[in-house]
């Protein structure tokens, strides 16, 4: 108890409001041995230097508290547990009045659990029905037969193993969580941009995915129409397994749905420039779109759902490719579920619209 008053159920009170600089502590000889032993280990070594508050017995007077006693046994109204100084000021006390037991210790007291157990034993002596009996002794090594001791030991070992396993699981969880956060960061900065980005970042992500699938990809950023100076296709992709095949690639990202008016772009100037450059029409053209890029890919509607709007691609031996399908094909190949060569063959044969069935 750090301070205040302790009622005596009479006109008298215990008040902890007297300051002393004394340092000499003593445990009275009539203190019960169990109490004395715990005082020696939990109170005496922890006494602070400097001012300390001690108890006095007081009674209410007109406007103040008059001192009745401030040393020894406080007029025999308590059992002093610790005296301090030559004056024998009361530093800790035990008081029993009207069936109530008060154990009053200084704030620096340690071993709280031991004090609680001891106090409950004391309460049990005063009022046995209010405190459950202490049955811990029946499982102690001192008072247990070998069979009980073995089971107690087995239970303790199991609990220890449980704690150690829990600690290890928590360590592994933190480790894997850190790995997950790092892999998520790398995915967001890498291939997953094919689902979230537009512009140059989307082109870079598409390039990475196509190369991972085994295509040879050339960035055509510096390739411009000689007459207009306008940029042509974003990429050209070739398949090492088919030397005669090549595709011109236009990559578009959209905050909302893909635009039908963008479909003929890859079949216009880029295809004409390629024919002028090589003397033949491009074997294929791809219009790769990342529509509704700010939304959950699982909830996005099909890009340009009417195949009639894709006729320019169909007539040019080309196809619309949704980045979601391209990503899932890449994911299946990366996971060993699908074969990269089969995916490339499927893409080379695509006409009008290319779809990938996960796990196919």
Image (tube, grey):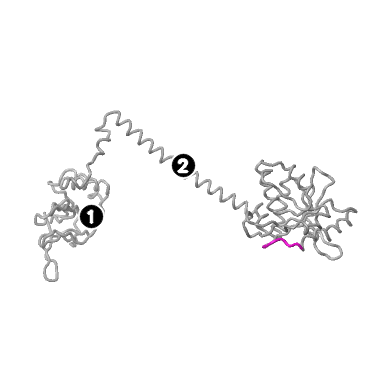
Question: Residue at left 15%, top 56%?
Answer: 89
Q: Quadrant where the C terminus lies?
A: top right
Mark 1 near mark 2, Cβ–Cβ under 8 Å?
Answer: no
Decide if residue 310 is on the left or right side of residue 133.
right
**Quadrant of the rendered structure where residue 87 is?**
bottom left
Decide if residue 321 is on the left or right side of residue 26.
right
Give the x, y percent position of residue 313: 80, 56
- Which residue is label 2 attached to? 168
- Number of numbered discs overlaid on the protein picture: 2
Which of the pair 347/305 is nearer the observer? 305
**Quadrant of the rendered structure where residue 71 is?**
bottom left
Front label number (1 vs 2): 2
Which of the pair 3/332 is nearer the observer? 332
- Which residue is label 1 attached to? 106
What's drawn in magenta, residue-wise? 255-260
Give the x, y percent position of residue 174: 50, 47
Give the x, y percent position of residue 178: 54, 49
Vertical comparison of 265 with 162: above or below: below
Q: Is residue 250 magenta?
A: no
Binning the other alpha carbons within 10 Å of mark 2 as few (below 14), some (14 to 19) or many (20 upward) gives: few
Question: Residue at left 44%, top 42%?
Answer: 166
Residue 47: which disc? none
Judged from the image, the secondary structure of the residue bearing numbered disc 1 is loop
Decide if residue 291 is on the left or right side of residue 349.
left
């Amino acid at each position: 108890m750090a301070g205040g008053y302790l009622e005596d159920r009479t006109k008298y009170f215990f008040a902890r409001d007297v300051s002393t600089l004394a340092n000499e502590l003593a445990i009275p000889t009539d203190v019960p041995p169990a109490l004395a032993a715990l005082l020696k280990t939990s109170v005496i070594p922890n006494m602070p230097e400097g001012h300390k508050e001690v108890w006095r017995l007081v009674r209410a007077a007109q406007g103040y508290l008059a001192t009745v006693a401030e040393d020894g046994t406080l007029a025999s109204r308590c059992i002093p547990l610790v005296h301090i100084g030559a004056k024998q000021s009361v530093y800790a006390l035990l008081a029993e009045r009207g069936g109530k037991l008060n154990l009053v210790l200084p704030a620096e007291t340690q071993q709280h659990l031991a004090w609680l157990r001891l106090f409950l034993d004391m309460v049990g002596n005063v009022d046995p029905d209010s405190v459950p009996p202490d049955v811990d002794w029946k499982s102690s090594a001192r008072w247990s037969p070998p069979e009980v001791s073995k089971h107690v030991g087995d239970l303790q070992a199991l609990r220890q193993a449980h704690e150690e396993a829990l600690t290890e699981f928590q360590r592994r969880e933190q480790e894997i969580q850190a790995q997950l956060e790092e892999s998520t960061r790398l995915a967001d900065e890498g291939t997953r941009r094919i689902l979230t980005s537009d512009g140059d970042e989307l082109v870079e992500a598409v390039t990475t995915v196509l190369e991972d699938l085994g295509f040879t990809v050339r960035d055509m950023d510096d390739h411009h129409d000689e007459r207009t100076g306008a940029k042509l296709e974003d990429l050209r992709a070739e398949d090492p397994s088919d030397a005669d095949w090549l595709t011109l690639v236009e990559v578009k990202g959209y905050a909302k749905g893909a635009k039908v008016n963008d479909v003929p772009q890859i079949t216009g100037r880029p295809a004409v420039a390629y024919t002028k450059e090589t003397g033949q029409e491009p074997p294929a053209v791809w219009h790769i779109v990342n529509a509704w890029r700010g939304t959950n890919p699982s909830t996005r509607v099909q890009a340009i759902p009417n195949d009639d709007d894709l006729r320019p691609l169909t007539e040019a031996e080309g196809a619309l490719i949704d980045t979601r399908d391209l990503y899932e094909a890449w994911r299946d190949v990366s996971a060993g579920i699908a074969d990269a060569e089969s995916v490339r063959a499927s893409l080379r044969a695509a006409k009008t619209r290319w779809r990938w069935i996960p796990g196919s």
